[in-house]
Image: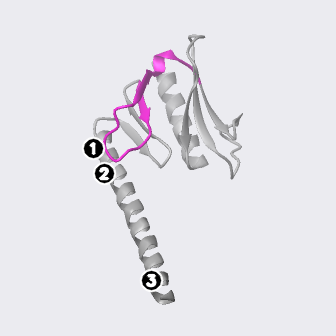
């Protein structure tokens, strides 16, 4: 009886892990189809972001191509900042730990700032530099 309960619990854990892997695989497949239309794109478990020209599209990954994506133009962006644990950091002095977010502040006062999360600080720093460079090319 004890062996049966032990193996049943292991079997349930195995199926849970298999479902989680299948779910993540479907998200990556949907992202791959979605990212084909962009000049540059990024996927991680927190957010996906795509850049085409000066247009930024971002949203939360899903098993299907999400329909709740957000768009904005770099023409409307006043500042692009890298936040680690909700504090602005310099791109030359990156901490090794913390929650990385790229924040976009807009010229319009009534437009709230957009925060796009990243899992890795170095990757967020590279994207911040890339987006700042892209924004500066507009001027």
Element on which disc 2 rests: helix
Q: Quickly name the residue at label 1.
A: 33
Q: Residues within 10 Å of mark 3 (few under 14, many from 20)?
A: few
**Do residues under tags 2 and 1 come within 8 Å of each other at their CB atoms?**
yes
The CA distance from mark 3 to mark 1 is 39 Å
Q: Position of residue 135 (x, y in %)?
A: 50, 24
Question: For residue 99: magenta?
Answer: no
Q: Quickly name the residue at label 3.
A: 7
The CA distance from mark 3 to mark 2 is 33 Å
Element on which disc 1 rests: helix
- Name the N-terminal-most of marks 3 and 2: 3
Q: How is the image coloured?
A: one colour
The outermost residue toward the front is 1
Q: Residues within 10 Å of mark 1 (few under 14, many from 20)?
A: few
Question: For residue 61: magenta?
Answer: yes
Q: Quickly name the residue at label 2.
A: 29
Residues rendered magenta in the picture: 55-79
Marker count (numbered): 3
Residue at screen point 59% across, 30% down:
103
Q: Position of residue 46 (x, y in %)?
A: 50, 45
**Do residues under tags 3 and 2 come within 8 Å of each other at their CB atoms?**
no
Q: Residues within 10 Å of mark 2 (few under 14, many from 20)?
A: some
């Amino acid at each position: 009886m004890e062996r049966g309960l032990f193996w049943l619990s292991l079997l349930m854990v195995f199926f849970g892990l298999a479902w989680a892997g299948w779910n993540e695989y479907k998200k990556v497949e949907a992202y791959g189809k979605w990212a084909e239309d962009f000049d540059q794109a990024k996927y991680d478990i927190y957010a996906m972001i795509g850049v085409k020209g000066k247009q930024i599209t971002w949203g939360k990954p899903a098993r299907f191509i999400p329909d709740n994506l957000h768009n904005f133009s770099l023409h409307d962006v006043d500042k692009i900042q890298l936040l680690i644990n909700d504090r602005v950091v310099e791109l030359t002095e990156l901490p090794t730990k913390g929650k990385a977010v790229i924040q976009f502040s807009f010229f319009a006062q009534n437009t709230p700032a957009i925060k796009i999360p990243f899992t890795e600080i170095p990757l967020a720093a590279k994207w911040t530099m890339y987006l700042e460079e892209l924004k500066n090319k507009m001027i």
